[in-house]
């Protein structure tokens, strides 16, 4: 069934992409069909899942590598499905209005559905490698979605930024997965957590995996892609960058923490990064005038919060995380939708330029206020419930937990501040904007249906806050699925407890800071970190490109002589070096084989050197021919008449071909600046010469057995029916060589004609005695 | 006895080739070198060929053919080189007597191809 | 005696070789190369006499013919392109 | 422009016929004596080169009945055919067969399919050289053809 | 079985012979080529199935018993390479027929293309070192002709580079052959396998390194690859596609074959290979990200990815070799596809320069999909074939505790993705340039054939991903053969 | 194998290498030719010292090893085909560029030049994150 | 006649190459010869007629000249002296076929001190390089002797008749 759901996403998404414009607004219906089905399935079949029985489907892919598409739905998955598919459906409804009949609607809808499927895969995967598969699919679909306004260079750059950072993390994580999988002996998550490995290797693997989680969930210092991704249309931001994709990292931390939180670096790393992210993100959220940027940094901050809760590995914190992840999905998606509505209707989302939102904006403002309040953890909203849980989980803990708690409180204070800031921006923008200019009044207001999805989410925040029992069991089961020790009992009123006190302190401090916002801003101006994450990213990319450019211009000289020199010297030096590293020297062979060798050696050396230094092309060709004749004489004295015959004939024909070509070329070799200077050329030449000599002597000296050709001499006549052994070898014993050889010749013939006559009319013979076919073109037309 | 004859013929032939070589090396201009090369080598190969024809069983016919080929081709080749060199630039040719060909000018160009 | 002849031949060949290398004109080189070809034919015949085998005579025959091709080709070239 | 030579052309025509005989001899004798398809083809090719040198490219192309490409095609077909045919009889490729006939007058005539293969080699070598002349033989300035058209 | 092994070599040659003769009729040439390669594809597939089932098979050419004669051997590796290669050749042939270009304008295209096919098949199937040289030469000669078909100045320039470098490689190969024969008196690979083992270890390592260099030039490994990006991109698209997909892999095949058969684990320079692999990956991908032309970018990626295959060999474990084999299968298909797509882009937009391209995704959505899928696969993004292949290598590397090369391979994977997104963002994204003239309809005549064959290859690469499990099993069986070559040797020597 | 001939082979290879490292294709061709000759000497030597031509009926003990001869023959012929092609390339190069020099790759030179400047600037990678 | 001469010559060459005079070789040689003559029927050097006795005379004269030439060369090589006057002399011939002209020209090249450089067809003239051109009459006589012997050996009847015409004045007048 789980496969059917995933497949449905793929099919619907593809259908929407292919159908595109022809479907009109139907793209949203068809696109939403898949996530809606997931929700329906959860409602229909969810009892089984939520009760903890779980639904597992498995499909082998590459069994030998442990790569299996194992899917497993447990209560925590169910919670994630609510986020991914449930909010997904609402996002579709929202996007229906947002995009209208825009030309990109088809692309967005199709890609959203594919993304939803990938995200569903992430939360259902019960195999680390399968999880990686879906993980990267979310990266790719996110890339395409961020870049959906591809004419905008900023969108393209942001898309690439997001992809590179998340893919970097993904690859590091993959390395971690493989190491961890090998340590554990399985990639199956449930199995692995049942008996988690420990030790140094595991610790290293976990750090690698966490890098992946941090990039995906925009944790410091990998957060900078998320604000950039805000160039995407708001429905996409609402879905990917608040509700769904950015939760993938948190999800992974949540899954693994119960088994691995105790392993070495896990807890300090996760809690440290999470706290830094929460506080730094919160601080950054105080500054932007772009509402989406504000929400983006707020999201980063909240993701840090969740990372801490899940990563710390305390059962109660885990339970709190489950509550927070859901609550955050509700309020953050709603807030993004609100910003989208504002942007869509008022054509700006800059606080300084926002018009006054008057008639018809009531519902929107209500949604915004409720959701922001939930974000600020004001009772009786869902956010408050979650935060109470979080405070409660850590308040009784050890020293480390106390530090975490302090950080969380600090981060929450900031959350309160930017929540207020956001609310004010919509209701009294002048409060949070320096300009005193008169604001225009928004000339039209959003339709009811446009606001409805956000309203549903806001209502959710209220209902869950007011009636915690609605989701208490659900969260309890989810937490239980992660960690059997974890239990959640959500209540609005616990009595006057430490958490309540902390909540009040949080709200009060937040209000105070908002009141003294100018002083805060002044302090903040001095606090700015010297480099931003974006600068780090940019610098890294530029550095890599610069390094690549340098390396490439170094090795890729574009000059044939240099390439040839490198190859030849590599061959000579590497081979000889390898040879002399072991036993090789057999002793000197005889000096001279016979008196006839001396004049022949004279011809070869004299001709060779003369051909090398010749300054005229023709002379060089002729001298090459002389060397060839010397070769033929060598073949004569060595007892190879066939070779001698062939060598003489070929050498002469070669000279003829040389002459045909040389008659168009200049007489002398021009003196030009060489690509490789003379001493270097001589050195490489000498190296090649020495390499040949040394290796030949070594090779010949190590022969112990007679050649296989003895049998050929014996078999030539009886089996090959010929006396000439060489000929029998050529046409029979090694006829395959000859076959190849004549193929080379035939091909050369075709190529020569094609090359020489390209672009010229076919050869014609003027002589009247010629037949028509003799005049016909040969290699080219 | 036959060995001695073969040896003498071979040495004589080789001597002529050596003579031709020395001539080619020592003579001052192209035509003089050609006079030496064409004649002496032809004679030399003829003598060596006879030696070979005597000495090698079953090789007579091929040697005769080889020598015949040289006899037919060597003078034609010499003619062709000489003719080309006459026209070509950059060849050292010393004509201190008469030059009927030079007097003829370009007239030849018209009908030299009239083979 | 064949050895003596071979040595003489080698000396002759050396003379031709020097002229091929030294030139100075292309025509000189071609003339010398032509001489070298005849020397080679003679050398092959002498080699055959010495080893008393006939296998190399085909080589001699082919060289005699093919040398002509090379020489005329060279001559045709210098006629066009100068010596 | 080619300056033709009566002396050279006459010699070449005399030698040409002989060289063809030599090349065919080398082809057929090659299995038992020095020679073979390569050398045979090369000698024939050299003979053709000679004709080219003496008479120019048109002299060469006009004397042939087969286009240069035809030589390649036929040669390659013969060689690969020899390799393929044994497959039809369940033998390995290039498995050559030899047949001997004992004829009263002629004595023993031996024929092996290796000769067919070698003939393919021969044709390809000839074809290659012809194609070289076709490609490069023409004077790049193009006045050779003109000279021929004005000739006899 | 004999025919199954011989036909992939002989049939294309015979087809080439016919095709040369049919030079005047392009239609007849096309029929000959398609029928020939189609038949060879079928026989090769049957061969692979049978070899996988029954084990390696050898054919003694001319009936001469080894080590005298030349042996053709089909083991799993050879059969796999053969099948993938002929599939590519067939697909690219169809593309070429559709494309108005080299195929249409040169009577030589078809015969030479068939010769190339025969050469590649021979290289995979031969069990003889000298015959391998001949196979290389056949392939090279055909490639020289194909790369310069048309004779444009830039082709001449790059043709010179390609030919000269290849000639140097051939020369070094011949030197290696002379040394091998001098040392052992045989060139039969199976026979050599036993005789090389008896050589003094210095001589043996020297030969091993020399052969790596020889095949490494062809395979384009560091520092021997610099010629490749300068020569491949100028050829006509179908030619570049085949070169990119197949020719370097012939070199890789030769490295794997020679190192596993002749210089097994105890002597093979494993660490050296891993260093070479890493440098090849990095320097190759660095080159890619600095380029501005699609085909040049892709050419550098060829190099970079050769590093992955060498990595698998360098690990010299069962898993490593299996990964290398799987990577080769994936890479051949994907690389060929990408070059065909690059050709379609050039066809459509008249250029392959990123700076001049824009908005193709909107103009040609089909083309965009055809690019995106293999591009992601190339970058090793799941669920495409490249991911499985990369995973196999990473897994093997981790098992062998070679963490550095694993890290390098993952980093290079990221840079590859960067490079692919650069193409995507610059060529496929962006506003539609209204000023660009649409190519005249006439040149689009065979477009459906071009797009169709490209799409078929994309589908093939998806099929590889889907069936990665059985394919990995096959790769593992292949790797087992390579690590335990005794079966190969016994098959050849008839023991 | 004798020292003299091995040295000859090495010297021919060295000469060939020297020419191959030049720029003019016609010279490179000569170099390839010399390399080919050097290698052929090596192959012939790989069969041991010479002997009688290998013809059935002779004394097989004294035969020169025929197998390297077959190798060399194949090598010679292939080299011929390749050299002819290479020369045609030089010819064509002369026709289209009036030179037979192997020029440096244009694109490589361009990339190298650009690497001097800031490579990243051309990449449109500025982060869109807006500072308030 | 010409064709027959070619056939016989080629068959003889074939048999000589096989170095074995058998029926099989004769027949196959004839076959090869017929094929070649049939395939390349482009013989242009004119009619060739063979007169055996005259051929022998020519051969004898030629061998004598060659021997002299060798000695002359030997002397010049071993004891080089400044050449007095070398030059190129035009030597007119009377009408004969290309084959015979070639024969004459080749023979001149192989005889002492002379080298045929060029042939002019109309009027038929050889241009001969001589190491010593102080006395052109000697040159003329030698060449005239050669011409007569050659025409008688291989020329057709018209050519032999042409020998009677004395047109010395045409070239000597210069
Ligand atoms: Na086409
Ligand atoms: Na662009």
Image (spheres, coloured by chain):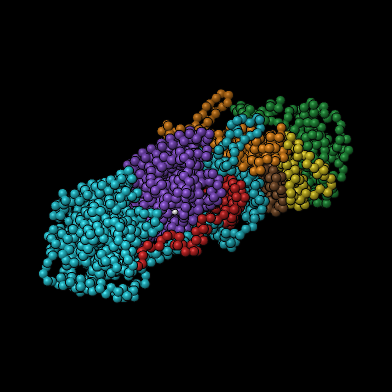
Chain colours: A cyan, B yellow, C brown, D orange, E purple, F red, G green
Task: Please tell me whether residue G129 is drawn above or below residue A417 in the rendered image.
Answer: above
Q: Is residue F127 visible?
A: yes
Q: Residue furthest top?
A: D104
Quarter of the figure with residue F2: bottom right
Q: Position of residue A261 (x, y in %)?
A: 22, 66
* Left or right of A662 in this view: E294: left
Q: Position of residue A286 (x, y in %)?
A: 29, 69
* Residue positioned 79% across, 45% down in the render: G71
* Residue positioned 28% across, 73% down in the render: A517
* Residue positioned 17% across, 63% down in the render: A381
Q: Position of residue B19 (x, y in %)?
A: 75, 48
* Left or right of A235 in this view: D140: right
Q: Quadrant of the C terminus of chain A?
A: top right
* Residue positioned 50% across, 49% down in the render: E234
* Left or right of E494 in this view: A312: left
Q: Nearer the viewer, residue A154 or C64?
A: A154
């Amino acid at each position: 069934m789980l496969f059917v759901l995933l497949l449905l996403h793929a099919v619907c998404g593809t259908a929407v992409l292919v159908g595109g414009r022809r479907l009109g607004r139907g793209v949203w219906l068809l696109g939403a069909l898949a996530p809606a089905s997931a929700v329906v399935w959860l409602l229909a079949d969810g009892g089984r899942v939520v009760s903890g029985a779980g639904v597992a489907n498995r499909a082998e892919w590459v069994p030998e590598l442990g790569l299996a598409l194992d899917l497993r739905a447990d209560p925590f998955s169910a919670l994630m499905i609510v986020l991914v598919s449930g909010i997904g459906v609402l996002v579709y409804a929202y996007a229906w209005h947002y995009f209208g009949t825009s030309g990109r609607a088809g692309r967005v809808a199709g890609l959203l559905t594919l993304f939803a499927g990938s995200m569903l895969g992430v939360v259902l995967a019960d195999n680390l490698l399968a999880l990686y598969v879906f993980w990267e699919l979310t990266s790719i679909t996110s890339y395409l979605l961020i870049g959906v306004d591809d004419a905008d260079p900023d969108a393209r750059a942001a898309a690439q930024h997001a992809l590179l950072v998340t893919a970097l993390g993904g690859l590091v994580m993959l390395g971690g997965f493989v190491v961890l999988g090998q340590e554990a002996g399985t990639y199956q998550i449930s199995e692995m957590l049942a008996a988690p490995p420990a030790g140094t290797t595991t610790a290293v693997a976990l750090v690698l995996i966490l890098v992946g989680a941090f990039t995906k969930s925009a944790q410091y210092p990998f957060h900078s892609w998320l604000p950039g991704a805000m160039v995407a249309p708001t429905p996409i931001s609402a879905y990917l960058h608040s509700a769904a994709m950015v939760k993938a990292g948190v999800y992974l931390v949540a899954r693994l923490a119960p088994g691995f939180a105790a392993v070495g670096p896990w807890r300090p790393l996760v809690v440290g990064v999470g706290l830094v992210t929460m506080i730094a993100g919160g601080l950054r959220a105080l500054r932007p005038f772009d509402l989406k940027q504000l929400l983006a940094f707020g999201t980063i901050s909240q993701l840090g919060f969740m990372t801490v809760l899940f990563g710390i590995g305390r059962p109660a914190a885990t339970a709190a995380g489950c509550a927070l992840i859901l609550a955050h999905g509700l309020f953050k998606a709603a807030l993004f939708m609100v910003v989208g509505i504002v942007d869509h209707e008022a054509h700006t989302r800059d606080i300084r330029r926002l018009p006054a939102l008057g008639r018809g904006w009531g519902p929107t403002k209500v949604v915004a206020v409720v959701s922001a309040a939930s974000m600020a953890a004001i009772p009786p909203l869902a956010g408050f419930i979650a935060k109470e849980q979080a405070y409660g989980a850590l308040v009784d803990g050890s020293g480390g937990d106390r530090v975490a708690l302090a950080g969380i409180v600090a981060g929450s204070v900031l959350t309160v501040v930017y929540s207020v800031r956001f609310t004010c921006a919509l209701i009294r923008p002048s409060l949070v904007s320096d300009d005193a200019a008169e604001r225009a009044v928004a000339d039209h207001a959003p339709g009811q249906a446009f606001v409805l999805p956000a309203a549903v989410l806001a209502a959710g925040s209220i209902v869950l806050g007011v009636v915690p029992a609605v989701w208490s069991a659900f969260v309890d089961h989810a937490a239980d699925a992660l960690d059997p020790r974890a239990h959640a009992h959500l209540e609005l009123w616990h009595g006057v407890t430490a958490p309540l006190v902390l909540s009040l302190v949080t709200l009060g401090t937040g209000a105070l800071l908002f009141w003294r916002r100018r002083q805060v801003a002044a302090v903040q101006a001095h606090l700015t970190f010297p480099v931003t994450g974006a600068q780090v990213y940019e610098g890294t990319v530029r550095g890599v490109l610069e390094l690549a450019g340098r390396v490439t211009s170094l090795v890729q000289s574009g000059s044939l002589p240099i390439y040839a020199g490198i190859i030849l010297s590599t061959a000579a030096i590497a081979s000889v070096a390898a040879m002399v590293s072991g036993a090789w020297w057999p002793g000197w062979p005889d000096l001279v084989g016979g008196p006839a060798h001396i004049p022949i050696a004279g011809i070869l050396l004299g001709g060779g050197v003369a051909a090398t230094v010749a300054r005229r092309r023709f002379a060089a060709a002729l001298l090459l021919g002389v060397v060839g004749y010397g070769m033929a004489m060598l073949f004569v004295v060595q007892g190879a008449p066939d070779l001698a015959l062939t060598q003489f004939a070929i050498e002469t024909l070669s000279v003829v071909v040389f002459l045909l070509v040389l008659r168009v070329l200049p007489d002398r070799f021009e003196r030009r600046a060489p690509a490789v200077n003379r001493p270097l050329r001589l050195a490489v030449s000498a190296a090649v010469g020495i390499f040949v000599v040394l290796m030949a002597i070594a090779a010949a000296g190590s022969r112990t057995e007679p050649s296989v050709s003895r049998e050929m001499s014996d078999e030539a006549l009886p089996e090959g029916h010929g006396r000439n052994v060489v000929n029998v070898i050529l046409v029979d014993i090694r006829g395959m060589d000859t076959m190849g050889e004549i193929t080379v010749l035939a091909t050369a013939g075709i190529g020569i004609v094609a090359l020489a006559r390209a672009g010229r009319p076919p050869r014609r013979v003027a002589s009247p005695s010629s037949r028509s076919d003799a005049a016909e073109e040969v290699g080219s037309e | 006895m036959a060995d001695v004859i073969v040896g003498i013929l071979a040495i004589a032939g080789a001597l002529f080739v050596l003579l031709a070589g020395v001539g080619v090396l020592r003579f001052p201009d192209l035509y003089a070198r050609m006079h030496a090369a064409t004649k002496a080598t032809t004679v030399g190969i003829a003598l060596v060929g006879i030696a070979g024809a005597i000495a090698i069983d079953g090789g007579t016919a091929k040697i005769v053919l080889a020598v015949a080929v040289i006899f037919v081709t060597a003078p034609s080749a010499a003619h062709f080189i000489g003719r080309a060199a006459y026209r070509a630039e950059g060849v050292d040719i010393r004509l201190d007597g008469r030059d009927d060909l030079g007097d003829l000018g370009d007239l030849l160009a018209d009908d030299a191809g009239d083979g | 005696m064949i050895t003596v002849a071979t040595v003489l031949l080698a000396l002759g060949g050396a003379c031709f070789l020097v002229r091929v290398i030294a030139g100075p004109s292309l025509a000189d080189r071609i003339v010398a190369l032509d001489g070298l070809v005849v020397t080679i034919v003679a050398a092959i015949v002498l080699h055959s006499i010495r080893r008393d085998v006939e296998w190399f005579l085909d080589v001699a025959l082919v060289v005699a013919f093919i040398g002509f091709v090379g020489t005329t080709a060279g001559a045709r070239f210098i006629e066009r392109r100068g010596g | 422009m080619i300056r033709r030579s009566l002396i050279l052309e006459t010699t070449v025509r005399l030698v040409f016929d002989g060289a063809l005989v030599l090349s065919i001899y080398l082809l057929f004798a090659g299995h038992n004596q020095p020679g073979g398809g390569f050398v045979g083809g090369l000698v024939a090719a050299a003979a053709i080169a000679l004709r080219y040198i003496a008479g120019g490219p048109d002299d060469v192309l006009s004397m042939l009945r087969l286009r240069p490409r035809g030589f390649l095609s036929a040669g390659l077909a013969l060689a690969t055919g020899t390799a393929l045919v044994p497959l039809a009889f369940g033998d390995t490729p290039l498995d050559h067969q030899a047949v001997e006939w004992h004829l009263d007058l002629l004595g023993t005539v031996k024929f092996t399919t290796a000769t067919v293969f070698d003939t393919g080699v021969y044709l390809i070598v000839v074809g290659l050289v012809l194609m070289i002349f076709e490609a490069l033989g023409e004077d790049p300035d193009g006045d050779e053809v003109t000279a021929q058209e004005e000739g006899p | 079985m004999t025919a199954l092994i011989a036909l992939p070599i002989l049939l294309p040659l015979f087809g080439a012979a016919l095709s040369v003769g049919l030079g005047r009729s392009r239609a007849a040439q096309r029929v000959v080529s398609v029928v020939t390669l189609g038949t060879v594809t079928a026989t090769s597939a049957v061969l692979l199935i049978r070899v996988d089932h029954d084990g390696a098979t050898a054919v003694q050419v001319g009936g001469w018993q080894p080590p005298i004669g030349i042996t053709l051997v089909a083991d799993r590796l050879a059969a796999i390479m053969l099948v993938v290669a002929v599939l590519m050749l067939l697909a690219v042939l169809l593309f070429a027929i559709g494309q108005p270009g080299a195929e249409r304008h040169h009577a030589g295209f078809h015969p030479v293309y068939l010769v190339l096919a025969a050469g590649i098949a021979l290289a995979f199937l031969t069990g003889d070192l000298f015959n391998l040289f001949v196979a290389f030469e056949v392939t090279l000669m055909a490639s020289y002709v194909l790369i310069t078909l048309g004779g444009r100045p830039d082709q001449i320039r790059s043709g010179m580079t390609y030919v000269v470098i290849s000639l140097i490689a051939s020369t070094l190969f011949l030197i290696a052959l002379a040394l091998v024969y001098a040392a052992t008196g045989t060139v039969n690979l199976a026979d050599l396998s036993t005789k090389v083992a008896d050589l003094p270890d210095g001589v043996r390592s020297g030969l091993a390194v020399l052969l790596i260099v020889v095949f490494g030039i062809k395979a384009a490994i560091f520092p021997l690859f610099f010629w490749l990006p300068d020569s491949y991109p100028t050829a006509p698209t179908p030619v570049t596609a085949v070169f990119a997909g197949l020719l370097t892999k012939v070199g890789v095949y030769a490295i794997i074959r020679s190192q596993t058969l002749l210089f097994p684990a105890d002597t093979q320079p494993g660490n050296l290979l891993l260093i070479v692999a890493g440098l090849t990956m990095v320097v190759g991908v660095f080159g890619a990200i600095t380029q501005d032309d699609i085909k040049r970018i892709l050419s550098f990626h060829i190099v970079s990815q050769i590093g992955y295959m060498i990595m698998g060999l360098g690990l010299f474990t069962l898993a490593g070799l299996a990964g290398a084999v799987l990577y080769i299968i994936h890479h051949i298909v994907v690389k060929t596809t990408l070059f065909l797509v690059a050709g379609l882009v050039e066809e459509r937009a008249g250029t392959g320069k990123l700076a001049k391209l824009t908005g193709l995704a909107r103009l040609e959505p089909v083309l965009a999909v055809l690019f995106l899928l293999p591009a992601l696969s190339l970058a090793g993004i799941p669920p495409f074939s490249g991911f499985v292949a990369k995973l196999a290598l990473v897994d093997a590397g981790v098992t062998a505790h070679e963490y550095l090369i694993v890290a390098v391979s993952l980093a290079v994977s990221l840079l590859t993705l960067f490079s692919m997104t650069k193409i995507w963002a610059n060529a496929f994204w962006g506003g539609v340039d209204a000023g660009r003239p649409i190519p005249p309809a006439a040149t689009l005549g065979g477009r459906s054939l071009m797009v169709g064959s490209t799409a078929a290859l994309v589908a093939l690469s998806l099929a590889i991903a889907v069936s990665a499990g059985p394919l990995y099993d096959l790769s593992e069986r292949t790797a087992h053969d390579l690590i335990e070559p005794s079966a190969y040797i016994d098959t050849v020597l008839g023991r | 194998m004798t020292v003299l001939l091995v040295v000859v082979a090495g010297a021919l290879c060295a000469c060939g290498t020297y020419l191959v490292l030049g720029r003019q294709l016609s010279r490179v061709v000569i170099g390839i030719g010399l390399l080919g000759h050097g290698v052929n000497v090596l192959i012939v030597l790989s069969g041991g010292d010479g002997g009688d031509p290998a013809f059935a009926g002779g004394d097989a003990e004294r035969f020169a090893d025929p197998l390297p001869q077959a190798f060399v023959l194949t090598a010679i012929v292939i080299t011929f085909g390749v050299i002819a092609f290479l020369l045609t390339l030089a010819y064509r190069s002369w026709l289209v560029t009036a030179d037979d020099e192997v020029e440096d790759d244009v694109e490589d030179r361009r990339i190298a030049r650009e690497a001097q400047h800031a490579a990243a600037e051309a990449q449109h990678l500025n982060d869109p994150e807006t500072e308030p | 006649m010409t064709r027959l001469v070619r056939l016989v010559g080629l068959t003889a060459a074939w048999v000589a190459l096989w170095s074995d005079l058998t029926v099989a070789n004769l027949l196959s040689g004839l076959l090869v010869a017929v094929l070649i003559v049939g395939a390349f029927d482009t013989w242009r050097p004119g009619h060739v007629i063979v007169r055996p006795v005259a051929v022998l005379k020519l051969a004898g004269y030629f061998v004598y000249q060659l021997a002299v030439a060798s000695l002359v060369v030997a002397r010049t090589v071993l004891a080089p002296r400044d050449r007095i006057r070398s030059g190129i002399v035009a030597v007119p011939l009377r009408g004969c076929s290309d084959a015979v002209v070639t024969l004459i020209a080749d023979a001149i090249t192989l005889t002492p001190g002379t080298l045929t450089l060029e042939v002019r067809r109309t009027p038929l003239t050889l241009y001969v390089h001589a190491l010593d051109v102080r006395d052109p009459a000697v040159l003329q006589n030698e060449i005239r002797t050669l011409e007569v012997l050659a025409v008688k050996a291989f020329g057709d009847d018209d050519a032999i008749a042409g020998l009677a015409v004395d047109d010395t004045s045409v070239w000597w007048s210069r």
